[in-house]
Amino acid sequence: MKKQLKRQSNTGKDRPRIMAGYNFAYLDEQTKRMIRRTILKAVAIPGYQVPFGSREMPLPYGWGTGGIQVTASLIGPEDTLKVIDQGADDTTNAVSIRRFFSRTAGVHTTTRTREATIIQTRHRIPETHLRNGQIIVYQVPIPEPLRFIEPRAKEVLRMHALKEYGIMFVKLYEDISRYGRIAKAFDYPVLVNDRYVMSPSPIPKFDNPKMDCMPALQIFGAGREKRIYSVPPYTKVKSLDFEDYPFEVERWSRCCALCGSDNSYLDEIIMDDRGSKLFVCSDTDHCNERVAGGYKGNQAESIEEAQISTGTGARKCA
Amino acid sequence: MVATIDLNQMTPGFSDPVFNSQETFRAILGAMAHPGRIVTAGSALDSPHPLNRASAAVCLTLLDFETPLWTDLDSDHMAIGWLRFHCGCPVVQNPSEATFAMITNNDAMPSLNKFKTGNDECPESSTTLIIQTSGLSSMDGKRLSGPGIETFSTLKMEGLTERFWQDRQIQFTMFPLGVDILFTCENTLAALPRTVKVEG
Amino acid sequence: MYVAVKGGEQAIANAHKLLSEKRRGDQAVPELEISQIKEQLGLSVDRVMTEGSLYDRELAAIAIKQAQGDLVEAIFLLRAYRTTLPRFGFSEPIETSRMEIQRRISSSFKDIPGGQVLGPTYDYTHRLIDFALEIPDNGNSETCRAEVAAEAIQNAMPRVADLLLAEGLIEDEATDNDRRPVADLTRDPLELPAERDARLQNLARGDEGFILSLAYSILRGFGASGHPFLGEIRFGEVTVELVPEELGFPIEVGEVSVTECIMFNRFMGSATTSPKFVRGYGLAFGHCERKAMAMAIIDYALRSRELGERSEYPAQDEEFVLFHSDNIQASGFVEHLKLPHYVDFQADLVLMRNRQGEFRDGKKEGRDERELEDEKAAKEAE
């Protein structure tokens, strides 16, 4: 009876077309409710990792199951989804996750950062400034910033509870005394809202400053580790450092070979076996947008597109 | 108690549970991520008296058999029957056992510290309060600041007692412990998570 | 010239087509039928059902076929399907003392009421490849038919542990009546310290290889209490009962075959508790003896805290064992290293180049004596 009454009008006219036999966005409604409640608590306690009943997904753990569960609980027919991996929309895992949502939720997808309402990402924050109203969902492998200093869950729980982050600063200081710098290039720990030390996920530390007072809502999903956490818009996010060793980001002496950008994160491409290299933007949308706007790098003419080889056909090469 | 539910008088829940709850959740999330921002929810609902449409929509979206609810309504009230029927949530007598609380009469509301405020290791295990107000506007009122707010925002919630604001002030100093609050009025709602500093 | 890689979607689709082709293999060879897998690769089916946490021989067999016999991949398929299934209710605990026995042995006693029933077993087979199996004989051969015993196996066989219980020599594990909800790791995250129900569920779902090796480490010396005794291992069919809300009494909903293992371990007593034998418990779907035994050994090892014993070895470390036992989590995370990581590697490259630069500069300014000595020694060696 209960089900019938609820279900009788469950056939809206504008429902998107989705894969038969599965609920909208794959997850069942009870699971979505549980994840939604978790997300709200995560927003209410910035930087704190909220445990949740992460489900087994049809994609492997470590391949974005946390981000996928968060996105699946957020997404609706009005949304436009962008999925990136390493900053690029066309990396294999980004393609695979985007396809998962087109199949299970039938939503619009885009590669344009500006057009997206939800951006699911692995390892990068787009170069284009995110605006208020957008949501960025990070895929997180190890949500616990203290894990590699203290692997015991019970111990680190106490440290977070007491805001006792001494071991983290000791570790960072050891780096400085041994190597002259903090030896963390990505997944560089941050302090959120002056309370919780948080893992920003394995983004390069180059991206850390973008998190500070970001107008967009940031949500982090760790499926295998069963944690969700968040940074609300306009929230203070500080990369850990010392007065005499302030936090600094990577710099390149070169510009993007395609669009000439001198302030974006660059990928290094090895061109041949003699060590020739090329530097191009990791954020493909940002780069394309600049190229479309007339910006040019020093090798813009010598670029050609190719298909990823699957072994069935020959790779197109110049 | 479940047997007293009169199906003939029962108003329906969401017309499309999947999409209506998704839409409502995004409204709640928008409110929670931007404390003080007023959003709309449940506009098309026929909510059972005395629940307003926004409160009813929040319940349909977030409550189920895993979320014990405390409310100030009498246990045989029709609105409780409606909540039990559509959400399947257990109704508890003690506010300290509740994951959600529905407050319809602000004058008689229990002190905030009677609800779950979480503990140091699990600050998330705290009650989310849904407080019905007689008016909600952002024209003037309290000055809010904190995460989710660029500089400050203003929110006026009608009909809350001075004692409530004193309680809230005490809880604010307990961060990360504390309750999170959704204020509702007709088909609108605004959020006051524990992080937010309230002045004025 | 730089070649920008595009067209990932098509590449993935092509890769999956190639996989289907590979799975099918030589088209001249008849395609495997699901019934063949179910009947002739039954132990694979049993393992996939156990670690996949879903009792469905048909689905497990399809998963094995789909995964080209990669059992971890098949377990993953079954798990992912399982999450989408609605829950109708919770069954009553199965009663293994009423099992329809196919095999049952105890190594703690020479003879036991109901007898030692060898049943189908690889024990005492000589591991010589049977070349007769190379050519199918379509069941004509007499060698694959066993004779029927003159006497039927008893219907109810008392569990060996219950016999010791009557004498007060073993801990009483009578079901507690508090009826608190049984842990379910597929719905809630694992919390530490974990109760025994959560631990047993974790071990049952855990990777056979991992659990087995940990059990081996206990027996080999990385475990405090030494040698456990196999109280009993039994394999057979049990009925599953459910109490529907509206009826209020149990009804039979089906039958499953399970392997149950109980290990006896010495507990020498403490200031407050009398000395006695305590149990390690293992249970698996189908016929999975190795798994059930290993599970029973680890179950006991993880009881060290509750028994007030020292916990100093890896297999007794609850957090270490429970957080690393799941092969779906483990393989997902290990294999995620195949995903592109070039952004992070770039960050490390920048860091490493800076660090190397500093290292070289430092050397020019003044190398320490040990470095100079090392260099001298290296030259002399040449």
Image (cartoon, rainbow, N blue to C red):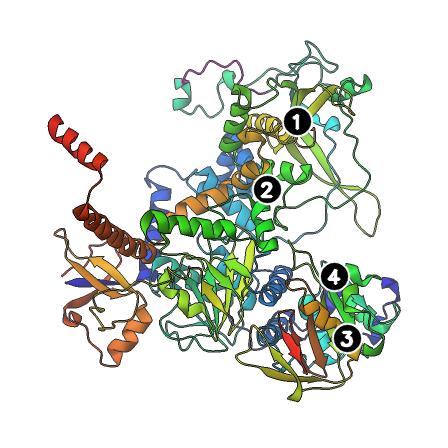
Residue A38 badge: none
Q: Chain of mark 1?
A: C
Q: Is label 3 in a helix, a strand or a loop?
A: helix
From the viewer's perspective, tell me whether residue C216 is left or right of residue A10: left
Going from N to C along the chain, the mark reached first, 2 or 1, is 2
Where, by quadrant of the figure, is residue C256 drawn?
A: top right
From the image, state whether disc 2 or disc 1 is nearer to you: 1
Q: Amino acid at mark 4?
A: Lys
Q: Main secondary structure of the magenta part?
A: loop
Of labels 3 and 4, earlier in sequence is 4
In the picture of the structure, the residue carrying the numbered disc 1 is C309
The chain letter under disc 4 is B
Res. A210 visible in picture: yes
Relative vertical location of residue C211 with respect to residue A235 in this rendering, above or below: above
CA separation, marks 4 and 1? 37 Å
- In three-dimensional space, the C-alpha distance between marks 3 and 4, rounded to whole angstroms, equals 16 Å
Q: Please say if the residues under marks 3 and 4 sit with CB atoms less than 8 Å apart.
A: no
